[in-house]
Image (cartoon, grey):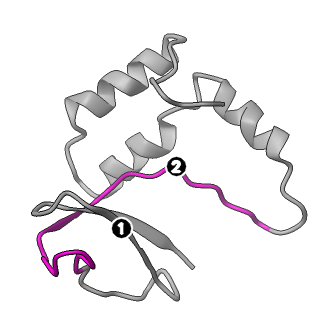
């Protein structure tokens, strides 16, 4: 059951929408101003495939700078969307050992 984050292009508010399944579709509407001019935000995600989730395991994965950005790059490619330069720079910086500002791992 996915939760997607959006930013309103009119009032700049951020909000989330919950969907009952990945196949559900709904046109997002800003709950603050009612605008349909919204954009999807890229969010950090966690997946659980059964069993217990070991937070240390996820922390170890993301602390390896070679793993940072793989899913983001794949997602942009899969959807045929050009990756913004700012995202590319953050990924390249992370792979070079510099973590993005404000990211506490």
Say whether disc 2 or disc 1 marks the residue closer to the N-terminus: 1
- Give the CA separation, mark 2 to mark 1: 15 Å
**Circle 2 sits in a helix, a strand or a loop, which is it?**
loop
Relative horizontal placement of residue 3, taking residue 8 as reference (left or right): right
21 on left or right of 33: right
Which corner quadrant holds the N terminus? bottom right
At x 11%, y 70%, the residue is: 37
Density class for disc 1 (Cα within 10 Å; few <14, some 14-19, many ≥20) is: some
Marks 2 and 1: CB-CB under 8 Å?
no
Instruction: Please name the predominant secondary structure of the magenta segment in the image.
Output: loop
- Residue at 20% over, 43% down: 82
Q: Quadrant of residue 6?
A: bottom left
Q: Which residue is mark 2?
A: 44
Identify the image quadrant of residue 66. Answer: top right
Point out the stretch of residues depicted in magenta: 29-49
Q: Nearer the viewer, mark 2 or mark 1?
A: 1
Checking the image for residue 15, the label placed there is 1
From what the image shows, is residue 53 above or below residue 32?
A: above
Q: Nearer the viewer, residue 37 or 13?
A: 13
């Amino acid at each position: 059951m996915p939760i997607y984050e959006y930013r309103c292009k009119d009032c700049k508010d951020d909000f989330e929408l919950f969907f009952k399944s990945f196949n559900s579709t709904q046109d997002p509407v800003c709950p603050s101003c009612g605008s349909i001019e919204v954009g999807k935000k890229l969010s950090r995600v966690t997946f659980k495939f059964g069993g217990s989730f070991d937070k240390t395991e996820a922390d170890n994965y993301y602390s390896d700078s070679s793993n940072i950005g793989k899913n983001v790059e794949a997602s942009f490619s899969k959807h045929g969307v050009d990756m913004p330069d700012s995202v590319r720079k953050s990924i390249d910086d992370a792979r070079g050992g510099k973590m993005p500002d404000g990211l506490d791992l």
